[in-house]
Amino acid sequence: MRDGAIEELRASVGLQIDDEALLTELAGGLSAVEQLLREVVRSDVAAVNEAARHLVEAGGKRFRPLFTLLAGQFGTAGEDAREGVVTAAAAVELVHLATLYHDDVMDEATMRRGAESVNARWDNTVAILTGDFLFAHASRLVADLGTDAARIIAETFGELVTGQMRETVGPGQGEDPIEHYLTVIGQKTGSLIATSGRFGGMLSDASPEHIEALRRFGDLIGTAFQISDDIIDIDSPSAESGKSQGTDLREGVKTLPMLYELAEDRPDPRLVELLGGPITDDAEVVEALTLLRSSRGLERARTTLSGYAQRARTELEALPPTPARDACESVADYLVARTH
């Protein structure tokens, strides 16, 4: 399990770990998380069991549980804390998976992680209810971790839903679309990764200062992840991204590079026209991508990404210099490097 899990994480999030003891511990923790995920979503109702296991077994980066396990390295509780940290890691992944079920309904997606999405395979109602089922089990797991943990996950639910509502409604009258977008991705992506770091630190008895640094790092690195994905969807440096470019254009989603370009004093008029809505014509997608790759908007998005990554690295300076901190720094470095 160890070699496969760590190599997948290196490929997907740029994780670099040279310390053999840390590698072994993280791999064991991820194995325990996978086992717990499968146990938790099991149901005696065949339809529920099949739909709930669908995304769990499809795999994924598992970055949120990984970060929970890494954050658990900064405490003083030692081996006694391992069970609680693993439980928290599984809970945050269940929350993440639940949001994916709901996102696929809102996006009318047909594929997720290389497999047919639940809403396409069954229907929207099954997908929504399955997401609710996973939210319920995540709450049950966190309830065993104490009232503080239960309050934190409830607050995180609120952030996730608020971010989705903000995105759905769009910026208000007079609101800066760029600030609105950064707020949305901070709530939709950063908040849960921040909670992952907070849980790992809390449950391993890390100091309040270290817990707060892990929370802030998670918040910033989560936002950086989304900006990095925005850039790659336009200008992947290689086929290694494993993603089809122009997805956001086809869905009519205005990501950070597009918003920056539209905010320019003299944006390209043709690009403004193309970004007016979803693009269904393949030739127009190629045209829009070509214009965006040479745009000031893409350049500004890369600068913003570097800023978030640097701020995330700065938060890590509050933590002791350990292999776990080095691993976190490697993720921040990777998010910038993967866009060039």
Image (cartoon, grey):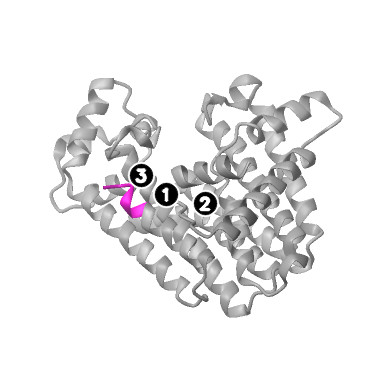
Q: Residue 256 at what x, y percent from top left?
A: 33, 49
Q: Amino acid at mark 3?
A: Asp
Q: Is residue 115 above or below residue 21?
A: above
Q: Residue 63 at what x, y percent from top left?
A: 55, 49
Q: Which element is circle 1 on? A: helix
Residue at mark 3: 230
Q: Which element is circle 3 on? A: helix
Picture residue at 50% right of the left edge, 68% below the top: 216
How far apart are the alpha carbons under marks 3 and 2? 14 Å
Q: Residue 128 at what x, y percent from top left?
A: 67, 34
How far apart are the alpha carbons under marks 1 and 2? 10 Å
Picture residue at 66% right of the left edge, 30% below the top: 127
Confirm or deny contact between disc 3 and disc 2 (CB under 8 A). Answer: no
Which disc number belongs to residue 209?
A: none
Residue at mark 2: 188
Left or right relative to 337: residue 122: right
Confirm or deny contact between disc 3 and disc 1 (CB under 8 A). Answer: yes
Region rendered in magenta: 335-340
- Is residue 221 visible in the rendered image? The answer is yes
Picture residue at 43% right of the left edge, 48% below the top: 170
Confirm or deny contact between disc 1 and disc 2 (CB under 8 A). Answer: yes
Left or right relative to 70: residue 91: right
How far apart are the alpha carbons under marks 3 and 1? 6 Å
Neighbourhood count class around disc 2 (C-alpha, 10 Å): few under 14, some 14–19, many 20 upward: many
Query: In terms of sequence position, does the residue under pointer 3 or pointer 2 come before the other?
Result: 2
